[in-house]
Amino acid sequence: MSDIRGEPCNILHGPWRRSGERLTGQTTIRHRLVWLARWFRDFLYDLRFSARSLLRSPGFTAATLLSLALGIGATTAIYSPVDQVILHSLPVREPERLSASKSLASHEQSH
């Protein structure tokens, strides 16, 4: 492993250290820019590879997209009522004073 100058760096102390000294702020900024550029380049390579792989197998692509759509739809369908009932308070003045009641007439008719 080497730093941006091509000099070896100690893995235990990270790429920002060299010979036990901290690199200057300018070098740290340059190192971060180099790291960001490499990360972005690698991300684009991975994205291109993924797109090529998905285009080669349309059946797998369809199954993948269907699974994602069902998963996102199911998560939204479950989260929406939970959000309304549990996470948001009721639109009344004193929600803690509300109580549930059950009619005896409907209970007697079912027997």
Image (spheres, helix red, strand yellow):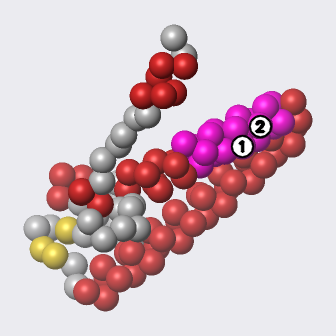
Q: Residue at x 61, y 45 (%)?
A: 77
Q: Is residue 100 above or below residue 45?
A: above
Q: Farthest left residue?
A: 20
Which of the image's four quarters has the N terminus? bottom left
- The part of the chain drawn in magenta is 60-78
Q: Residues within 10 Å of mark 2 (few under 14, many from 20)?
A: few
In the image: residue 79, left or right of residue 41: left
Residues 9 and 40: in front is: 40
Q: Farthest top residue?
A: 111
Please identify the dominant SS of the magenta region. helix
* Residue 36 location (% of width, % of height): 48, 71
Q: In the rendering, which numbered label is found on residue 69?
A: 1
- Is mark 1 in CB contact (under 8 Å) with mark 2? yes
Q: Is residue 13 above or below residue 53?
A: below
* Residue 76 location (% of width, % of height): 59, 49
Q: In the rendering, which numbered label is found on residue 66?
A: 2
Q: Residue at x 24, y 57 (%)?
A: 96
In the image: residue 9, left or right of residue 88: left
Q: Residues within 10 Å of mark 1 (few under 14, many from 20)?
A: few
Residues 2 and 12: in front is: 12
Secondary structure type for disc 1: helix
Task: Indicate whether residue 77 is drawn in magenta.
Answer: yes
Residue 3, quarter of picture? bottom left
Amino acid type for the residue under numbered disc 1: Ala
